[in-house]
Amino acid sequence: MGNPNSGKSSLFNSLTGLNQKVGNFPGVTVDKKSGYAELAPGVRANIIDLPGTYSLYPKRNDEWVTYKVLLDQDTVSVSDMVIVLLVDGSNLKRNLLFCSQIIDLKIPVVVALTMMDIANKKGIEVDVTELERELGVPVVPVNPRKNKGIAQLKKTIALTAQQLYQTPARDFIQNKNLGGTAVDDVKKIFPKLSDYAAVHYLINHENFDLDKATHHKIESIEESNAFNPTKIQADEIMQRYARIRQIMQHTVSEPDPLQKKLFTERLDDILLHRVWGYIILIVVLFILFQSVFSLAQLPMNGIDWTFTQLRSWIDNVLPSAWWSNLLVNGILAGLGGILVFVPQIMILFGLITVLEDTGYMARISFLTDKLMRKVGLNGKSVMPMISGFACAVPAIMSARSIENKKERLLTILITPLMSCSARLPVYTILISLVIPHKEYLGFISLQAIVMMGLYLMGAVMALIVSYVAKWFIDLKEKSFFILELPVYRAPRWKNIVVTMISKARIFVTDAGKVIIVISLILWALSTYGPPSNMEKVERHYNEQVQENPGQANELNMQRQSALLENSYAGILGKTIEPVIKPLGYDWKIGIAVITSFAAREVFVGTMATLYSVEGGKNADRQTLLQRMDSARREDGRKVYDLASGISLMIFYMLAMQCMSTLAVVRRETRSWKWPAIQLVYMTGLAYVMSLIAYQLLK
């Protein structure tokens, strides 16, 4: 455990490697990360990464989790526990407050001293041996990012677990004096408590799992001793900081505070400037989307060409049968629709990881706090919203860090409007179809500008919805925004590569399974139909071919199209066509819209399957983009023109087409009310905006 931004996640990853799992703490929607580590031969430890907290006075749900573990009010047993407390060596004064509180709980603790490289750059020198003597607990300098000090830390944890390091006999401050005789009275009820733990039982026993009689006894002790929690807390903090100042005088050498600013502070003067900060943010986002488009173009074309050639070759080699049709037009068409977008997914996640690793992502929260407050949110809402560019499910879960209930609920309601990676395949193929491949000034791509516009429009719509919704959600709670800005650091390229590979694997396995299943179902629905209808089509075109043998190829293409229209998928599409026709969509797009409610990226697999079935063998020689580009309406107009393309992009930008997101909203809000509201308002908004766009552009 430790303060936020003290390096907990890096140390946890370093200790556990891939032996990790994520769940929830009992009774609360707070992530519980755990894993196993070999500390020494025969000594195996279960490592639990507790939520970050600044002190033992919790305010948020995640801080209460850490607090209850320390006060032995959780399923994690204190008796079996060694605390590995991360202390930021570059910000020692603040970090030692939490450290001193844990020491006074008399729980075995090992201090992992992190950020020493940053401390050295600041000119801060820490006498580790003297600090260890003053605190009375082992102190081990570590650098998880470079795997330094990890072996020594493991050894120290193992020795502490074997009770070769004892907890300090004396308190950090005189805790008994804080509560007077009230402390002794509580310890008569709980003899094993330290003096400091007894103080916390007096302050927070209402939140502990105790029987009514015990609660009543503690209440009586408070009343008889005139116990004042607010005064006690203030006295405690003052005494602790007084002792911390003494310790730092003996153990820490700091530079003159009037020395020139650090690089981080000088850079923040530019990146957090009230004008230049926003301009730089827009430029950063443009570079992000330009890179997603330009860097992924070559590998995407290569994957698309490979699958086109493979399908054509297999179709020519295998005999004409239902199973070969299934393989080519069902499995391979669906698989190609998945893998072709892997390069873009990897590049998007890689660049987002760079922004997080360098420390710039936190600056985005700081920059946007003022804007967020005007629409009923605060700066902490930015992190879930930005995470929503990757996936709405973990983004909504990360909204747990927002203390204010109204702001948290608003953030959950609008986060799915941010364009997630599942929309990326849809945007890519539609932009390639309807937006010309033009460049301005030799390097600014029109397609990248449109892509960025879609992402920004989703964010703007989210803010507008939040502004409107804040008047309808009747929750009044004081809001505050405290953010610690991490120092700028070089990105960890290994971490970025691992993230890119991991996200690509998740996309292929999780989204891929859904796409393949739906592709197979669609193949069946689009290959088969009511026998009477299908026989009628076959009979009609057989007669036409016999009468006009010179037009056999053209008639066979018409036969495939007619068979598709009379299939079960075609009947479904034709049924909903009147509803979607005002948006510029035909029945094939209608089928894709329906299947996309399982997952948005299914759109591409649906198109691949439908056009493969319709095109027959001719489709095997064309890429999906070419097949969609050649699609025509009954009057000869292109199905995918500028008006219908923009309308479809707007629909996918705004519609709630993700069952997983609705499920996680239900879990986070503990009600079906809010997912239902989300589904209705997002789908309605998507329909109206797409209708306006098509009618204006057609």
Image: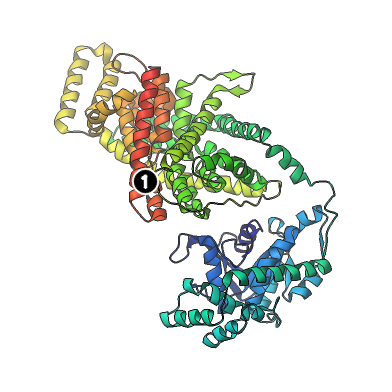
Residue 142 picture quarter: bottom right
The percent coordinates of residue 602 (x first, y second) are: 39, 38
Colour logic: rainbow
Position above or below: 377 against 65: above
Position above or below: 142 against 42: above
Q: If the image is split into quadrants, where does the N terminus sit?
A: bottom right
Number of marks in the image?
A: 1
Q: If the image is split into quadrants, where does the C terminus sit?
A: top left
425 sits left or right of 681 in the view: right
- Depth order, front residue of 127/179: 179
Q: Is residue 40 visible?
A: no
Please give the name of the residue rendered at 71% of the width and 42% of the height, measured from the top-left corner: 268
Q: Amino acid at mark 1?
A: Met
- Callout 1 secondary element: helix
The percent coordinates of residue 403 (x first, y second) are: 51, 55
Position above or below: 557 against 592: above
Q: Is residue 452 visible?
A: yes
353 sits left or right of 217 in the view: right
295 sits left or right of 533 in the view: right
Position above or below: 197 against 322: below
- Depth order, front residue of 550/474: 474
Q: Residue furthest left?
A: 532
Which residue is under mark 1?
659
The percent coordinates of residue 196 (x first, y second) are: 62, 77
334 sits left or right of 16 in the view: left
Please give the name of the residue rendered at 42% of the width and 80% of the height, measured from the top-left corner: 211
> Callout 1: few (<14), some (14-19), or many (20+) C-alpha neighbours within 10 Å?
some
The percent coordinates of residue 617 (x first, y second) are: 35, 26
